Amino acid sequence: MARIMFIFGTRPEAIKLAPLILAMRDDIRFDVSVCFTGQHRDLACAALQLFGIVADHALDLMVEGQPLDILFGRLLAETGAAIDRIAPDQVIVQGDTASALAGALAAHYRQLPVAHVEAGLRSGSLDHPWPEEAHRRMIATVAGLHFAPTRRAVQALLDENVPAARVHLTGNTVIDALEQMRDRLRGDPSLGARGRDLVAGAGDRPIVLTTCHRRETLGEPLAGITMALRAIAARGAAHILMPVHPAPEVRRIITDRLADAPGIRLVEPLDYASLLHVLDSARLVLTDSGGLQEEAPAMGVPVLILRETTERTEAIDAGAAELVGRAPERIIAAAMRHLGQPGGKRAPLYPFGTAGAARRISELLAAARTRSPEPAYADLPA
Ligand SMILES: CC(=O)N[C@@H]1[C@@H](OP(=O)(O)OP(=O)(O)OC[C@H]2O[C@@H](n3ccc(=O)[nH]c3=O)[C@H](O)[C@@H]2O)O[C@H](CO)[C@@H](O)[C@@H]1O
């Protein structure tokens, strides 16, 4: 049995790792432990609970206003201590957070193998997303197994001279999470109750789901985005639903500028089931979130990306997303163009792969114990 240790701390990591943790927990080839750093304590705990996952090791590292370097130092020391307690054969991290980088580096300092889920995403700019682009590149440097969601992500790693035998095309586990939760939503009317209420409250106006929380969006860009949202709502063209991220600076700007805006409903972060219910009912998504850029195409909902660059150009090429930036005029024009089109559901698109990534990754991890695995997955998008 291979001793596998997951290290993570935020909501998107919890959602994207849940299908893999569940698949590996049910597999006798693995002995799985979960180390949760508490980077987004409440949001991530709620997501884990929804998937029925309990962390074996919960660290308590968050202090409000803590600078990134202090946070990182504590994450590195504490994830290292947790690795020493568990003595895993393999550490798994996901994506681009400070928790993922600290866990990967702590494992590397102990000469333990690191596997990186959602490897190879690159925007090409260290400033967008900041500091996540640097985190991803540094994790790639110490990882021994790279699970890339798309062919483009595979290519990005090969271009950085990562040995081809260590890079595997798997699809994105977020699609597993979404499909599993969608199945449960269909069968259990009590799930996603908050989302059902919010959708009912929108009446017959088209719903625009919007979220904004990236560090590089704060300040002037976020002020521009709020102006655009006010203008769209003022035209009576939509009911804008905005779950507000708990980061204090995000919350302050958004509530100061939008709390009294007619047609805009600011709400607390939604549980994942409610979020998916709202997304399924939405006409349009406006966001700087990475996960929503991946989920919305699979639900047939177009996305306007409120960023200057994206590492998810696959969604743009598929016609599922548009990069609009943060300038109010561009956001308003693009949103009004979409809202002016006839309603009705679009066909789902899967630029980040169909469900099955978690199963592929667990098979690759099992195979990696004995040999260098080299499977090909013809069902993934070119
Ligand atoms: C630069 C970048 O793109 N980095 C990403 C970043 O994450 P992000 O930008 O996707 O983060 P968020 O937007 O916070 O989370 C999104 C998830 O949360 C759900 N959600 C949202 C609002 C709500 O009210 N209720 C919810 O349930 C939503 O459906 C979605 O699944 O880190 C990840 C981890 O390493 C990386 O994978 C990933 O590249």
Image (tube, rainbow, N blue to C red):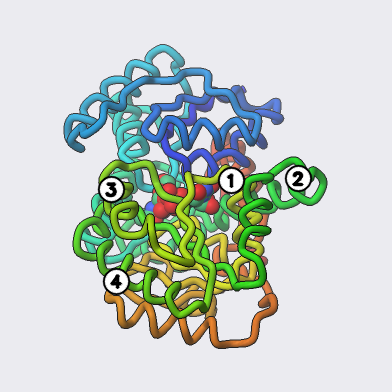
Question: In the image, which disc is placed on residue 184?
Answer: 2
- Residue drawn 45% across the image and 72% down it: 233
Distance from the alpha carbon under mark 2 to that under mark 4: 36 Å
Distance from the alpha carbon under mark 2 to that under mark 3: 35 Å
Name the residue carrying label 4.
326
Q: Nearer the viewer, mark 2 or mark 3?
A: 3
- Which one is earlier in the sequence, the residue at label 4 or at label 1? 1
Distance from the alpha carbon under mark 3 to that under mark 1: 23 Å
Say which element carries label 2.
Answer: helix
Badge 4 amino acid: Arg
| Relative horizontal placement of residue 77, taking residue 293 as reference (left or right) | left
> What percent of the width, then of the height, locates residue 70?
18, 30
Name the residue carrying label 3.
252
> What percent of the width, then of the height, locates residue 61?
31, 23
- Labels 2 and 4 touching (C-beta < 8 A): no
Cβ at disc 4 under 8 Å from ligand 1 = no
- Which one is earlier in the sequence, the residue at label 2 or at label 4? 2
